[in-house]
Amino acid sequence: MEKKRYVVMGAGEVGFHLARTLSREGHDVVVIEADGDKRERIEEIDAAAVIGNGAHVPVLEAARVDRTDLFMAVSSNDEANLAAAVLAKRLGARRTVVRVAVAEDVTTHRRIYEEVFGVDLLLSTQLLATTRILNHILGHNTLAVEYLARGKVQLRKIHLEADSVLTQRRLRDVEMPEGSLVVAFFRGEALFVPAGDDQAEPGDEALIVGKTETISRTQRILSRSPRTPGAVVICGGGATGETVALALAGQVDRVRIIETDRRRAEELAARFPDHEVLCGDATDPSLLKAERVAEARAFLALTGNDERNLMASLLAQELGVPRVIALVDRTETSHLWRKLGMMQVVSPRSLASERVREYIESGYSANIVSLKRGAAQVIERRLAPASPAAGVTLAEMSPPRGLIVGAVVRGEKVFIPRGKDRLEVGDTVILFVQEEHVPTVQLLFPGREPS
């Protein structure tokens, strides 16, 4: 194992777990932490401690970021993380990872952050938690999600079980919802672009592209044992609760949000006119009984307080809700939660740590299709007047099999192009490209990716 040097900014749940894991693997690890009381805890895991604000140059210099393979800004302060990433890159860090809280920063603005702040991997704890919760609730097998065209298009990698429609029929016989497309299959270390007569095998991974508002429906059709829960109750209307509520819209029969703060409850009611929003305390048994929470198919405890989430979850279980999921910040106590009740625990900080580990183990590939060591990639291009692809149909262009125009964004319209569709100047095209066809992309779609 090649010994590497890593600098971690922030000794909270994410940073501490990362530092401990990397140190145990024999790497040189430095942890930057503003709280001097955490020095002894850091040194216990055989990592060097630099006490100070990681967004200050002298602190970064003391941590010797100029010699680091990867600088990970994973503190709880988004602004400090972004500032530190810029400075670390300028001082010589080879790569940077930045953790942010808000999902929209990744889904809609990722490319701007990457370009302006020089971030190699931008991850949102909120978004990671939402994806995991949706897997539990909707029966999805989502392995990774990438947001393209400012959030209008999604690329998802999903695991295929034996009873997936993709393993039981040829691709041409699978009725895909409008606005979605299967672009690739992963089988072990191999990646291939399927033709109409191809059929997946159990255990394969499929890469699908589609419009954000419809891709969950596509995944329900393709995933194992798709299900649509009748009603879901969300305890906590904070940022994570709001993100989950938005993602569940149209995916379940009914969503009910219980929020303690009246002003916030009113905001959520205006934001989600089709959801039911209650102002109340989900740890109050009389409220849960009065609102017939026992009839829900799933209960999500998503407040920012671990103890409140635990109490609400146990009450929901007592009422007989069949599926209970709790958000937990303190990962070291999550195993105790599972002992207390048959609930599923989601830890945003553990998920963030897992995602950074995947990034390192993939050879520092942030693109989900590049996890196979660069076998393929996804490219966004805006068609310029000089582009040979502008003004021609896909049939006229006749791209090779390893170059797929997966989606087109034209103003507010998003569509999956067919042979007769003509590309226009100003279109943003989402391209799935196998490595050997990248030169063809440069020829047909010259220019840079839109920010």
Image (spheres, grey):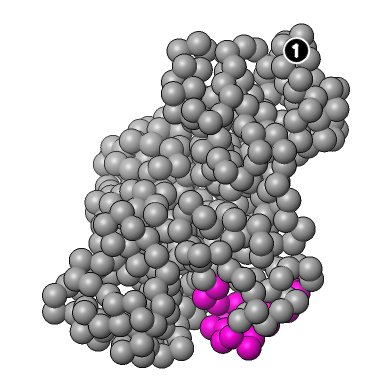
Please identify the quarter of the rendering in which residue 411 is found: bottom left
Left or right of 225? Residue 184 is left
x and y percentages locating residue 369 in the rendered image: 50, 71
- In terms of depth relative to the viewer, which is nearer, 9 or 300? 300
Please identify the quarter of the rendering in which residue 391 is found: bottom left
Left or right of 354? Residue 397 is left
Residue 349, relative to residue 123: is it above or below? above
- In terms of depth relative to the viewer, which is nearer, 425 or 140? 425
Residue 93, relative to residue 437: is it above or below? above
Left or right of 435? Residue 282 is right
Q: At numbered mark 1, what does the secondary structure look like: helix, strand or loop?
A: helix
Q: Is residue 258 visible?
A: yes
Q: Is residue 187 magenta?
A: yes
x and y percentages locating residue 418 in the rendered image: 41, 78
Q: State the residue at coordinates (24%, 51%).
A: 116
x and y percentages locating residue 427 in the rendered image: 26, 67
Q: State the residue at coordinates (78%, 15%).
A: 289
> What type is the residue that disc 1 sits on?
Ala
Q: Is residue 4 magenta?
A: no
- In terms of depth relative to the viewer, which is nearer, 83 or 352? 352
Please identify the quarter of the rendering in which residue 176 is found: bottom right
- In terms of depth relative to the viewer, which is nearer, 45 or 254? 254
Write down the region rendered in magenta.
182-204
Say which quadrant the C terminus sits in: bottom left
Say which quadrant the N terminus sits in: bottom right
Alpha-carbon neighbours of circle 1 within 10 Å: few (<14), some, or many (≥20)?
few
x and y percentages locating residue 117 in the rendered image: 28, 50
Give the residue pinned by disc 1. Answer: 290
